[in-house]
Image (cartoon, rainbow, N blue to C red):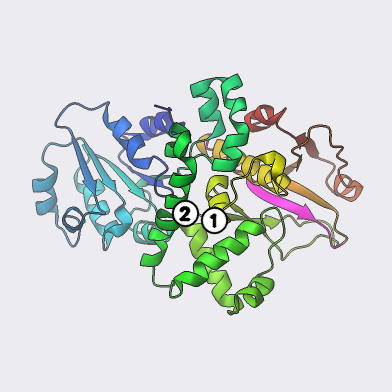
């Protein structure tokens, strides 16, 4: 099985008197990861609860210390999977962390909207929170070796990085269609703000066609024939369910810099391609540049997150349409990247950017130097 970068981090943070909160989309390996963590414990020391099951989540609904003591017994590790399904989850989790110091509590959730709103206040100062992603390319390199992982690059851009997709490549299209048609929206439909499921699917398709481009909420509202507020609300929910994420424009020194636009990318390019039903090889695609841009930006996001590096991420553009694909702000120092699929394609960073931000580093990112880029501190 493919080792996950989060495992040693979870082990490092264990037994410090705080809950471990693990957030991320369904089917990315959260349950497998926490069960691997459980292998460090003896038989009888681990309790696992699947809160997709009604009875198991009822254990933690309006519970008490007395009842929890009966349920937990002599457990040293308590795993509560899909905890966003528990009503008033935060209060139950607080009872465990406050009253059972010998217990390491691990909580997973596939909707940051539900779980974060439940646990943020009750678990203030009582938790370490992590986001988990589909498999990362660096995890593939560790598992398969550099040569084999690079030989899979095109397949990973097309079919994505969900664990089951990687380990069962012969079923990639079937599995992705199942993911995009069921699990992708499962938690969203449980949220109060989703009144038009068909609209949500049309919005996701519209966003899938626009990766790498600036997204206009006004334009989307006209295409979908709904209000701008509805578009904004639905995109916000898609972000909280780990379907898409947005990059804002960097703006600081120049009047010419845009400030109110955004780009929206998918956490997994396989899901994106399933949404538009396009699994063509890269040689036969018109969107390979945008696909590569989406792929490498999310891979950089994974690396930064697992290394616990705080980076502000942006794109940069002026009203005159001078632009840079990706910018990271590290304590005020800018790192600017042009992301190109073809290594021989020439890149020239805008003079206006270089003069406005002289303390910067620039790099063209291609498949040839992607591992150097991902390894940059």
Residue 253 included in the magenta stretch of the image: no
Q: Residues within 10 Å of mark 2 (few under 14, many from 20)?
A: some
Left or right relative to 230: residue 186? left
| Alpha carbons under labels 2 and 1: distance apart | 6 Å
- How far from the left and from the top, in percent, is residue 136? 53, 35
- How far from the left and from the top, in percent, is residue 186? 38, 59
Q: Which of 283 and 248 is in front in this view?
A: 283
**Quadrant housing residue 309:** top right
| Callout 2–callout 1 Cβ contact below 8 Å | yes
Name the image quarter holding the C terminus: top right
- How far from the left and from the top, in percent, is residue 325? 75, 47
Above or below, 147 against 303 in this view is: above
Q: Which residue is denoted by mark 1 in the rendering?
A: 275
Helix, strand, or loop for circle 2?
helix
- How far from the left and from the top, in percent, is residue 354? 87, 44
- The magenta span reads 307-319
Q: Nearer the viewer, residue 22 or 243?
A: 243
Residue drawn 32% across the image and 46% down it: 107
Give the number of marks: 2
Residue 331 seen in this snapshot: no
Q: Which of 91 and 107 is in front in this view?
A: 107
Helix, strand, or loop for circle 1?
helix
Per the rendering, the mark at residue 180 is 2
Residue 316 included in the magenta stretch of the image: yes
Q: How crowded is mark 1: few (under 14 residues within 10 Å), some or many (20 or more)?
A: many
Left or right relative to 364: residue 82? left
């Amino acid at each position: 099985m493919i080792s996950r970068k989060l495992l040693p981090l979870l082990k490092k943070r264990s037994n410090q008197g705080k809950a471990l909160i693990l957030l991320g989309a369904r089917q990315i390996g959260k349950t497998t990861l926490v069960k691997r963590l459980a292998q460090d414990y003896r038989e009888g020391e681990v309790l696992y609860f699947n809160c997709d099951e009604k009875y198991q989540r009822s254990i933690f609904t309006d519970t008490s210390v007395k009842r929890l003591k009966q349920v937990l017994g002599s457990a040293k590790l308590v795993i509560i999977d899909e905890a966003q399904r528990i009503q008033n989850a935060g209060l139950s989790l607080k009872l465990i962390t406050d009253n059972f110091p010998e217990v390491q509590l691990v909580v997973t959730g596939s909707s940051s909207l539900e779980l974060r709103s439940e646990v943020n206040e009750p678990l203030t100062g009582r938790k370490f929170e992590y986001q988990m992603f589909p498999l990362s390319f660096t995890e593939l390199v560790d598992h398969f070796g550099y040569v084999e992982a690079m030989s899979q690059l095109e397949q990973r851009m097309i079919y994505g990085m969900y664990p089951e997709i990687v380990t069962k490549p012969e079923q990639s299209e079937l599995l992705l269609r199942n993911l995009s048609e069921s699990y992708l929206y499962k938690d969203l439909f449980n949220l109060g703000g989703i009144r038009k499921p068909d609209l949500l699917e049309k919005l996701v398709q519209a966003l899938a066609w626009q990766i790498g481009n600036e997204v206009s909420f006004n334009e989307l509202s006209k295409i979908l024939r709904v209000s701008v507020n509805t578009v904004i609300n639905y995109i916000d929910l898609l972000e909280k369910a780990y379907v898409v994420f947005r990059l804002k424009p960097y703006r600081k020194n120049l009047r010419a810099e845009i400030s109110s636009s955004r780009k929206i990318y998918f956490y997994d390019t396989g899901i994106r391609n399933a949404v538009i039903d396009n699994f063509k090889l890269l040689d036969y695609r018109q969107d390979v540049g945008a696909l590569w841009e989406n792929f490498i930006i999310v891979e950089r996001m994974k690396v930064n997150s697992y290394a616990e590096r705080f980076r502000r991420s942006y794109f940069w553009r002026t009203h005159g349409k001078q632009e840079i694909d990706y910018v990271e702000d590290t304590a005020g120092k800018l790192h600017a990247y042009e992301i190109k699929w073809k290594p021989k394609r020439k890149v020239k960073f805008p003079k206006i950017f270089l003069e406005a931000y002289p303390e910067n580093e620039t790099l063209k990112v291609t498949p040839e130097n992607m591992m150097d880029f991902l390894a940059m501190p």
